[in-house]
Image (cartoon, grey):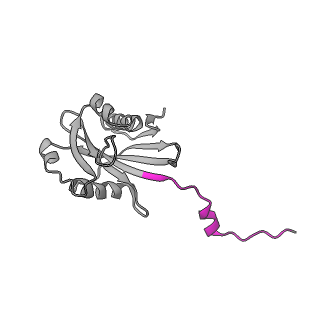
Amino acid sequence: MAETEPFSVEKFVAGLSRKRMASGVLFRDDTGRVLLVEPSYKQQWEIPGGAVDENESPWATVSRELTEELGMRRPVGRLLVVDYIHADGDWPEAVMFVFDGGVLTQSDVDAMVFADGEILSAGFYDLPAARERLIPRLAGRVEAALEAVKLGTTVLCEHGRPIT
């Protein structure tokens, strides 16, 4: 009778796949335009947020990033979008989250402090103007988040496209 190797939690965990995660927050103004931020380190614009650190929840990431990048402290709203991103070249697969940040005014934007140098500017943009500044899958995610706000739901996406 062949001996079986005893179960090893270490080996089991080492064999599990690892996914990167990132979280963003959707802020709007009273006309429905979305807040975009201009990063200093790449051409494409973003919504506020960033990569989830080890042992950090996606919602804690949003709070941390708002403080670090914009000098803001605001409560994180409900989950609007979960977007699964396929592996692409050197980039591993990922899960992206978008939370509701609610409505901001222009004075809120004017009071932002870009302390860590990652963000150059921030402003409100309607969806067509936002699409020009965002990579396509993030533009799709933002559009899905706006729909989730309108419908009071959470939208599941793959690569920025809602699944049906």
Q: Give the range drawn in magenta.
A: 2-21
Number of marks in picture: 0
- The part of the image, by quadrant, that contains residue 150 is top left
Q: In this view, does 57 lie to the left or right of 94?
A: left
From the top left corner, tell me how far across and down residue 120 is, in percent.
23, 47
Considering only vertical position in the picture, is 33 above or below 4? Answer: above
- The part of the image, by quadrant, that contains residue 46 is top left
Is residue 164 rendered magenta in the image?
no
Quadrant into which the N terminus falls: bottom right
Q: Which of 27 and 85 is in front in this view?
A: 85
Q: Which residue lies furthest to the left in this view?
A: 107
Q: In this view, does 4 lie to the left or right of 113?
A: right
Question: Residue at left 37%, top 39%?
Answer: 153
Question: Residue at left 47%, top 38%?
Answer: 159
Q: Which residue lies furthest to the top in this view?
A: 128
From the top left corner, tell me how far across and down residue 144 is, in percent.
37, 35
Question: Residue at left 42%, top 47%?
Answer: 96
Is residue 3 rendered magenta in the image?
yes
Q: Which of 103 and 36 is in front in this view?
A: 36
Considering only vertical position in the picture, is 49 above or below 159? Answer: below
The dominant secondary structure in magenta is: loop
Considering only vertical position in the picture, is 94 above or below 34? Answer: below
